[in-house]
Image (spheres, rainbow, N blue to C red):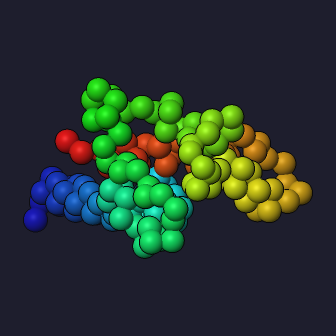
Amino acid sequence: MNHTRRSRTAIALTLAAATFANVAMAQQRVDFGKREYDSNCANCHGADGKGGGLYVEYLRRSPPDLSQLSKRNGGVFPMNRVYEVIEGAGVGHGSRDMPIWGQDYRVQAAEYYMDAPYNAESYVRGRILALVEYISRLQAK
């Protein structure tokens, strides 16, 4: 095998290995919004967001179908409203059957970071925005 052919083979193998590594890394990426949803929302709203979670029978009211938010808002996902409802500060969402996640996230941040410096509002905002983005992906077509 001549030098040029070996170089091409080495380059091809390197590219193949890099492609495989990128695919493996992509498969390992964490979907923070889905993780938030699965941890905090799916028990009431269901895995598909349609309101059929495991806790429905224990609730006073049925949770809303999150997959229809855009449809009920003229085809536009109501990002600000969804954020405000999840965050809970100054915005009512019914009888408060739904937890006020903004406050819950602040408490979790304080427990997690303890004496380390951190920005509580950035922590809360990041978690809520990841969740809102995931809910936007649940919208019915």
Residue extending furthest toward the right: 115
Of the 4 image quadrants, the one containing the C terminus is top left
Q: Which residue occupies the foreground of this view, 2 or 86?
A: 86
Q: In this figure, what is the number of numbered marks?
A: 0
Which x, y percent locates residue 76?
A: 33, 28
State whether residue 113 appears in this view: no
**Residue sitting at x 44%, y 67%:** 56
**Residue sitting at x 27%, y 29%:** 75
Which x, y percent locates residue 71?
A: 27, 35
Which x, y percent locates residue 92?
A: 61, 39
Of the 4 image quadrants, the one containing the N terminus is bottom left
**Residue sitting at x 68%, y 34%:** 90
Q: Which residue occupies the foreground of this view, 75 or 20?
A: 75
**Residue sitting at x 30%, y 43%:** 68
Q: Which residue occupies the foreground of this view, 27 or 128?
A: 128
Please indicate whether residue 138 sits to the left or right of residue 128 in the image.
Answer: left
State whether residue 98 appears in this view: yes
Check the image and report above or below for 130 versus 59: above
Residue 46: quadrant of the picture: bottom left
Which x, y percent locates residue 80?
A: 51, 30
Residue 29: quadrant of the picture: bottom left
Please indicate whether residue 129 sits to the left or right of residue 77 in the image.
Answer: right
Q: Which residue occupies the foreground of this view, 12 or 7?
A: 12
